[in-house]
Amino acid sequence: MSCSHISELEQAPFGVLRLPRTIVVGVEQRLAISQLASEFGRSVLICTDRRLAASQELHALVRDLGNMQMDVEVFGETEAELPTPGITACVEGLRSRQIDVVIGFGGGSCMDMAKVVSILLTHGGHPRDYYGEFAVPGPVKPVIAVPTTAGTGSEATAIAVVSDPDLGMKMGISSPHIIPQAAVCDPSLTYTCPPSLTAATGADAFVHLVESLTAIPRVPSPTLVHERVFVGRNALANSIALDGIRLVGSSLLTAYKDPENAGARGEMMLAALYGGIALSNAGTAAAHAIQYPVGALTHTAHGVGVGLLLPYVVRFNFAAIQPQLAQIAEALGENIHGLDPREAALAGVRAIDGILHGIEIPSTLAELGVAEGDLARIAELSMNSKRLIDNNPVQLDLNAIKSIVRAAFVGDHSING
Ligand SMILES: NC(=O)c1ccc[n+]([C@@H]2O[C@H](COP(=O)([O-])OP(=O)(O)OC[C@H]3O[C@@H](n4cnc5c(N)ncnc54)[C@H](O)[C@@H]3O)[C@@H](O)[C@H]2O)c1
């Protein structure tokens, strides 16, 4: 390949978009689920958690499915953060049952539960057999994902995240085979989310969008899409990420302060979906890598951790992502007209701070209960998330991670570059 050909590849738009086959968004669209499910067969498993299993909406779904002459099994014991023993217990209990379609009804934990249960029902084994990228050997039983939080975007992603007690950490299963066949995003299901959950999940969506838009760009070789599930920043994911950032800017604070504001809840549901689509194709980076050990140590919500870390990560990456930060500034309503590129990028950093401050995300690791003596270990464990570390726009080694972790501990907001 000639040099000029390589530079053409680098300059021309490159994009990857792997998606659910059907995405339905809108108030009361949960009433469309039973018809969608019936297209996949007669026997349905619903994975949900105790709170949602007791909800009127879940009871109505079971009734609708029954009216379509479907056999319905409800597993209502999904645990938050998805410990693997709960997944294997669910599958053990289904040994003698034929399941045609799995519905994940709940937050990211329930949707990821549906994905992993579907893998195990199709291919057998234990969740650990599928950790990493491309380890799922083929298609799985169809999953319909129905989010009840506006955050993870799992309804559209090629990833399921589990907590493995044997390894003492969270692990990802990433494969295009586990993208749900259908995502039904009904914002009215999120009206019951209290402000703290709205903030944590909204911050999660926001970080997905920003980290996808600012992920490392890769030379688009013809094998890239087969070598990586998450290919880095790319034209198709960028547009979606920017739209999502715009929606977060217009609606997250309102959804936080006014939980039953239908417009804001609807926009946040879309933003979370866009975040899932963007992350599932471009991928996330340092804020996610560092949150995993922070979350394991402090038992704080994933969204709170990534939201807290994002301002420090964008400051560390500043020199490599100035054009994207300027785009973020505009998407969040800042007037950057006439500013030089550095000033416009700084406006983006301040706008990111403003979103997270508005929903009262803590601003230092110390506030989450991290002690100074934990910092070195957090940095070392962050390096284990190689997929995320590799996706950062600035190359990261242990010292680089240590500097981000220390800044986040003491609240050092200086710009790198
Ligand atoms: N697969 C992916 O692409 C992906 C992406 C990001 C995060 N995740 C994973 O998703 C999980 C987090 O998901 P989450 O943040 O949605 O929370 P969650 O699913 O763990 O739920 C947290 C709590 O919120 C409650 N809840 C859910 N919906 C509610 C509602 N409408 N009203 C009131 N309470 C409600 C649940 O009952 C639970 O107690 C983590 O395990 C994380 O690692 C997955």
Image (cartoon, grey):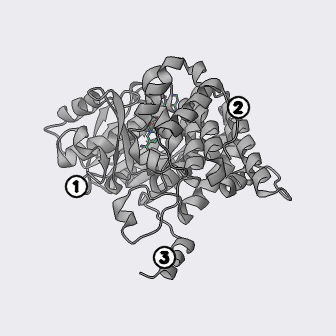
Q: Amino acid at mark 2?
A: His
Rendered position, 318 above or below 46: below
Residues marked 2 and 3 touching at CB (< 8 Å)? no
What is the distance, in whole Å, between disc 2 and disc 3 at their CAs?
43 Å
* Residue 103 appears in view: yes
What residue appears at the point 24 percent right and 32 percent down from the top-left corner? 90
The 10 Å Cα crowd at callout 2, few under 14, some 14 to 19, many 20 or more, is some
> Mark 3 falls on what kind of element?
helix
Of all residues, the one furthest to the front in this rendering is 399
Residues marked 2 and 1 touching at CB (< 8 Å)? no
* Whole-percent x, y for residue 381 in the image: 41, 32
CB at mark 1 closer than 8 A to ligand 1? no
- Residue 137's disc is 1
Q: Point out the tag, 2 or 1, that comes first from the N-terminus.
A: 1
* Whole-percent x, y for residue 27 in the image: 58, 46
What residue appears at the point 69 percent right and 34 percent down from the top-left corner? 413
Name the quarter where the N terminus is drawn. Answer: bottom left
The 10 Å Cα crowd at callout 3, few under 14, some 14 to 19, many 20 or more, is few
What residue appears at the point 24 percent right and 39 percent down from the top-left corner? 128
Q: Amino acid at mark 1?
A: Pro
> Mark 1 falls on what kind of element?
loop
Q: Which one is nearer the viewer's eye here, 375 or 337?
A: 375
The 10 Å Cα crowd at callout 1, few under 14, some 14 to 19, many 20 or more, is few
Report the residue marked by disc 2: 357
What is the distance, in whole Å, between disc 2 and disc 1 at their CAs?
43 Å
CB at mark 3 closer than 8 A to ligand 1? no
Q: Which one is nearer the viewer's eye here, 141 or 339?
A: 339
* Whole-percent x, y for residue 193 in the image: 57, 30
Report the residue marked by disc 3: 6
Rendered position, 407 above or below 32: above
